[in-house]
Image (tube, grey):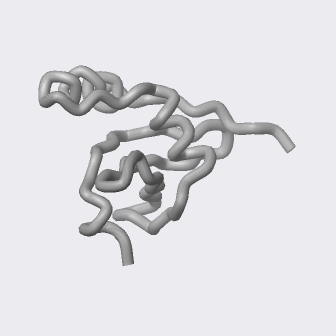
Amino acid sequence: MSVKEIVFSGHAETKFEILRQHGFEVSREVVLSAVRKPDKVEQGHKARKVAQMNLSATHVIRVIYEEGQAAIKVLTFYPGRRDRYED
């Protein structure tokens, strides 16, 4: 079984700096980990998926992506409060 390449959209690339400017630094490795080993995955709009992974006791990272035949494309990602997204 081959592992699909994970690519970032232009918006996702700029999101790292946008979050950094707001004092919430997220690394590429964290986003990649959320896609590869999420704590949960939800169905998003259209054919998109939302991967979620715990970041801390209070926050999660949510990654919106589309899965193609050859690659997974990260469209955007954002931090969220755990109490908002946990059951």
Q: Residue furthest bottom?
A: 87
Q: Residue at x 27, y 68 (%)?
A: 83
Q: Is residue 16 above or below residue 72?
A: above
Compare residues 51 and 43 and report the one nearer the observer.
Answer: 51
**Residue 23 in the figure: left or right of residue 86:** left
**Residue 48 in the figure: left or right of residue 15:** right
Q: Residue furthest left?
A: 22
Compare residues 44 and 18 and report the one nearer the observer.
Answer: 18
Compare residues 35 and 11 and report the one nearer the observer.
Answer: 35
Q: Can I make out residue 43 in this image?
A: yes
Q: Can I make out residue 48 in this image?
A: no
At which x and y percent is residue 46? 39, 63
The N terminus sits in image quarter: top right
The C terminus sits in image quarter: bottom left
Q: Is residue 7 above or below residue 87?
A: above
Q: Residue furthest front?
A: 57
At which x and y percent is residue 54? 44, 53
Task: Place residue 16 in its image quadrant.
Answer: top left
**Residue 19 in the figure: left or right of residue 40:** left
Q: Residue at x 75, y 38 (%)?
A: 3
Q: Residue at x 31, y 61 (%)?
A: 82
Q: Is residue 22 above or below residue 46?
A: above
At which x and y percent is residue 47? 46, 60
Q: Residue furthest right?
A: 1
Q: How many marks?
A: 0
Task: Place residue 38 in its image quadrant.
Answer: bottom right
Compare residues 21 and 74 and report the one nearer the observer.
Answer: 21
